[in-house]
């Protein structure tokens, strides 16, 4: 049997800060999750997104040291207006903007912000096709 892709993990310095950010993007974490060292949420398609604190990772890998952010997640929005609103809401809440909303040449309204661990998070929506 071949392996089956099942989950993506994110190492975080502060669980409460990270979950607060991702809750703003609609991820449904249970109440009290911010006090846990490991948290999971299942998204469409059955993929699990997992958060582990640095301390939790060190519990089984004592030599673990977080490296610089080297990836990111993308969130599809309903339309360009939602990209604008979500970007503005996140920036107003104190999350740094990486890129203000713009019309990307690949046909999407796009914006980028940083989460509490400095990961870049993309916000996008398909633009209407030119007539």
Image (cartoon, helix red, strand yellow):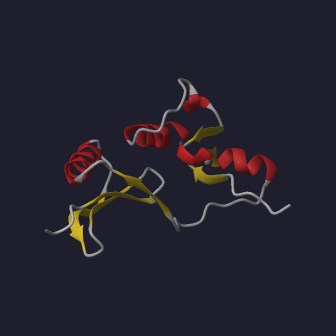
Residue 20 vertical position relative to residue 65 in the rendered view, above or below:
above
**Residue sticking out furthest to the front:** 131
Residue occupying the point 68% across, 52% down = 6
The quarter of the picture where the C terminus appears is: bottom left
Out of 130 and 114, give the one closest to the viewer. 130
Q: Position of residue 95 (x, y in %)?
A: 33, 50
Residue occupying the point 54% across, 67% down = 68
Residue occupying the point 25% across, 51% down = 79
Residue 110 vertical position relative to residue 55 in the rendered view, above or below:
below
The quarter of the picture where the N terminus appears is: bottom right
Figure quadrant of residue 99: bottom left
Q: Position of residue 62 (x, y in %)?
A: 78, 55
Out of 87 and 107, give the one closest to the viewer. 107
Residue occupying the point 43% across, 37% down = 23
| Number of numbered markers | 0
In screen coordinates, is 64 left or right of 36?
A: right
**Residue sticking out furthest to the right:** 1
In screen coordinates, is 118 left or right of 7?
A: left
Q: Position of residue 21 (x, y in %)?
A: 41, 42
Residue 25 vertical position relative to residue 74 in the rendered view, above or below:
above
In screen coordinates, is 8 left or right of 125?
A: right
């Amino acid at each position: 049997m071949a392996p089956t892709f099942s989950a993506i993990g994110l190492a975080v310095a502060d669980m409460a800060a990270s979950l607060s950010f991702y809750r703003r993007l609609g991820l449904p974490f249970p109440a009290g999750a911010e006090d846990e060292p490991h948290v999971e949420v299942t998204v469409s398609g059955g993929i699990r997104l997992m958060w582990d604190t640095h301390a939790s990772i060190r519990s089984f890998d004592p030599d673990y040291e977080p490296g610089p952010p080297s990836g990111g997640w993308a969130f599809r929005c309903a339309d360009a207006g939602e990209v604008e609103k979500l970007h503005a809401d996140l920036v107003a809440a104190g999350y740094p903007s990486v890129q203000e909303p713009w019309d990307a040449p690949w046909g999407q309204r796009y914006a980028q912000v940083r989460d509490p661990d400095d990961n870049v998070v993309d916000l996008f929506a398909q633009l209407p096709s030119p007539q």
